[in-house]
């Protein structure tokens, strides 16, 4: 439904295939028909009837011209008029289409209605009658097409702006707007089908009456009735009172619109039964369903808003922005100066930054990509410590071939914490990282040495946000699916994470 409303191309495709289907069925009906009433009218005037010349070909030409005219006006001219493009030219196209339809129908009707030449005194009178009727018919078709265009664009506007309309006029709901659009479309089909006047007038009164009663019920009658001890009975009594008051005005409207005097009272009585036995219970059911839906949506939005706020806040803390051009320059400079270790470090840092900028924004990524990022980080840090013999870094990270997904940047904070607090260039230090995956479970361990920070260290009393960050993310993203154990002694820091993916 949303695609139908907000995507004009989708609506155009529906219109195109609907018009094409009607055209194909019309041609098929023409092929399977033998002339019917036309041949009878020719026989009455004792004029020879030729199936192709007096029936099939004229109708086929008329159907084809109508189909082409609809396609041209609906898909080419009207959209440009709506956008106020070349108004004069498109106005000319409408006039040209009207004249073309008039002439084609006038000429083909001289073959379809050749029997009329026996009813008038001269050929000129017959031609005048045929072309006058054809012109009036072309005008009628243009009016019908204009009515369809108004209904279509009014419906699209109402539905696409339903939220804004409801915010401004609380009595109007999306269901009410859909009912209005449905009524307009149904009135269009009644007009184009040349339905009986009583049917058109009746539906023209009952349709809007039902919509107005529905909107009044959900905005006023039902909310007031719900405050009573017996809400449905209170709603029923108020409905009866409204229908009694509305009976005479509806009767008067039917009387004015219909040529039959008694029609107004008949349509008003029928309208009363429709509102009482159809619109009233339907309004009650829809209001109740709307109330339940609103409560569920409110709870979901509240929970989702809290979770999204937390996740966005946590993710923003691990989302730095880097400059790739600067890194490329540094990488080229390092190669020119034969600094292979520096160039290697810049290359690994670039890979890590691409991961941070592109994949870190996704809700889930492949576990293999998270592991690749972690390996790059460890290798980059190892370049800094490789010349120091009293620093030992051991890794046993198994490849994960299974296509498993994990929230990005979930494992790296533990490794970052190990390098931040576990490495000392003056004291013996070690870091050990192990990871393996087995039967939908990820096992991840990080050991690192700990060292007392000097008094002048500005971060001596700062614990950082890394571990608290990852704890909250685990709680939000993997409730009851993870086990996190953290132990710390004076010489060692240990983290064990078991995660079900």
Image (spheres, rainbow, N blue to C red):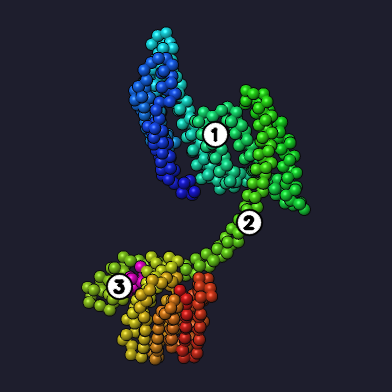
Mark 1 vs mark 2: which is more N-terminal? 1
Q: Which residue is pictured at 68% across the width and 38% down the height?
A: 273
Cα distance between the residues tagged 3 and 2: 56 Å
**Where does label 1 land, which residue?**
187
Residue 99 appears in view: no
In magenta segment, residue 18:
no
Q: Secondary structure at mark 1?
A: helix
375 or 147: nearer the eye? 147
CB atoms of marks 3 and 1 within 8 Å: no
Residue drawn at the location 52% of the way across and 30% of the way down: 191
User: Which percent across, then down, holds residue 143?
Assistant: 48, 28
Q: Nearer the viewer, mark 3 or mark 1?
A: 1
Q: Which residues are magenta?
A: 347-354
Magenta stretch, main secondary structure class: helix
Residue in the image at 50% along x and 31% along y: 193
Q: Position of residue 497 (x, y in %)?
A: 47, 80
Mark toward the viewer: 3 or 2: 2
Q: Earlier in the sequence, mark 3 or mark 1?
A: 1
| Residue 347, disc | 3
- Looking at the image, residue 349 lies above or below residue 296: below
Q: Tell whether label 2 touches label 1 (CB within 8 Å).
A: no
Q: The residue tagged with tag 3: helix, strand or loop? A: helix
Q: Position of residue 120 (x, y in %)?
A: 43, 10
Residue 429 placement: quadrant = bottom left
Within 10 Å of disc 3 (Cα), the crowding (few <14, some 14-19, many 20+) is some
Residue wearing tag 2:
292
In the rendered structure, does residue 351 fall within the stretch colored magenta? yes
């Amino acid at each position: 439904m949303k695609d139908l409303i907000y995507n004009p191309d989708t609506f155009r495709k529906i219109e195109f295939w609907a018009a094409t289907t009607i055209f194909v069925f019309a041609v098929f009906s023409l092929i399977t028909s033998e002339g019917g009433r036309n041949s009878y009218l020719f026989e009455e005037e004792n004029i020879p009837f030729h199936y192709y010349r007096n029936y099939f070909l004229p109708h086929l030409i008329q159907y084809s011209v109508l189909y082409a005219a609809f396609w041209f006006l609906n898909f080419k001219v009207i959209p440009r008029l709506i956008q106020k493009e070349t108004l004069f030219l498109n106005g000319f196209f409408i006039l040209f289409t009207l004249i073309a339809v008039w002439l084609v129908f006038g000429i083909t009707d001289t073959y379809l209605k050749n029997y009329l030449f026996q009813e008038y005194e001269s050929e000129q009178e017959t031609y005048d009658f045929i072309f006058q009727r054809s012109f009036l018919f072309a005008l009628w078709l243009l009016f019908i097409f204009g009515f369809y265009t108004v209904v279509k664009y009014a419906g699209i506007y109402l539905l696409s702006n339903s939220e804004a309309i409801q915010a401004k006029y609380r009595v109007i709901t999306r269901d009410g707007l859909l009912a209005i659009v449905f009524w307009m479309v149904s009135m269009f089909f009644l007009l184009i089908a040349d339905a009986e006047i009583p049917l058109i007038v009746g539906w023209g009164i009952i349709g809007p009456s039902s919509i107005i009663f529905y909107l009044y019920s959900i905005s006023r009658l039902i909310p007031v009735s719900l405050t009573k001890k017996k809400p449905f009975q209170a709603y029923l009594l108020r409905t009866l009172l409204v229908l009694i008051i509305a009976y005479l005005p509806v009767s008067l409207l039917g009387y004015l619109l219909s040529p039959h005097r008694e029609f107004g009272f008949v349509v008003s009585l029928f309208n009363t039964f429709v509102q009482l036995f159809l619109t009233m219970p339907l309004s009650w059911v829809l209001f109740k369903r709307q109330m339940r839906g609103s409560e569920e949506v409110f709870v979901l939005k509240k929970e989702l808003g809290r979770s999204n706020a937390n996740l966005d806040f946590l993710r923003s803390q691990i989302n730095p922005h880097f400059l790739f051009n600067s890194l490329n320059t540094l990488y080229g400079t390092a190669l020119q100066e034969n600094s292979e270790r520096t160039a290697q470090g810049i290359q690994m840092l670039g890979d890590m930054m691409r991961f941070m900028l592109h994949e870190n924004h996704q809700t889930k990524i492949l576990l293999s990509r998270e592991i690749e990022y972690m390996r790059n980080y460890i290798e980059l840090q190892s370049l800094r410590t490789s010349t120091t013999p009293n620093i030992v870094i051991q890794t046993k990270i198994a490849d994960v071939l299974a296509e498993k997904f994990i929230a990005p940047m979930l494992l790296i904070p533990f490794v970052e914490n190990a390098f931040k607090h576990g490495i000392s260039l003056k004291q013996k230090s070690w870091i050990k990282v192990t990871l393996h995956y087995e039967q939908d479970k990820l096992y991840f361990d990080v050991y690192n040495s700990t060292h007392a920070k000097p008094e002048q260290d500005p971060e001596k009393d700062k614990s950082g946000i890394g571990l608290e960050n990852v704890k909250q993310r685990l709680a939000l993203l993997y409730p009851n699916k993870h086990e996190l154990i953290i132990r710390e002694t004076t010489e060692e820091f240990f983290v064990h994470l078991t995660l079900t993916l």
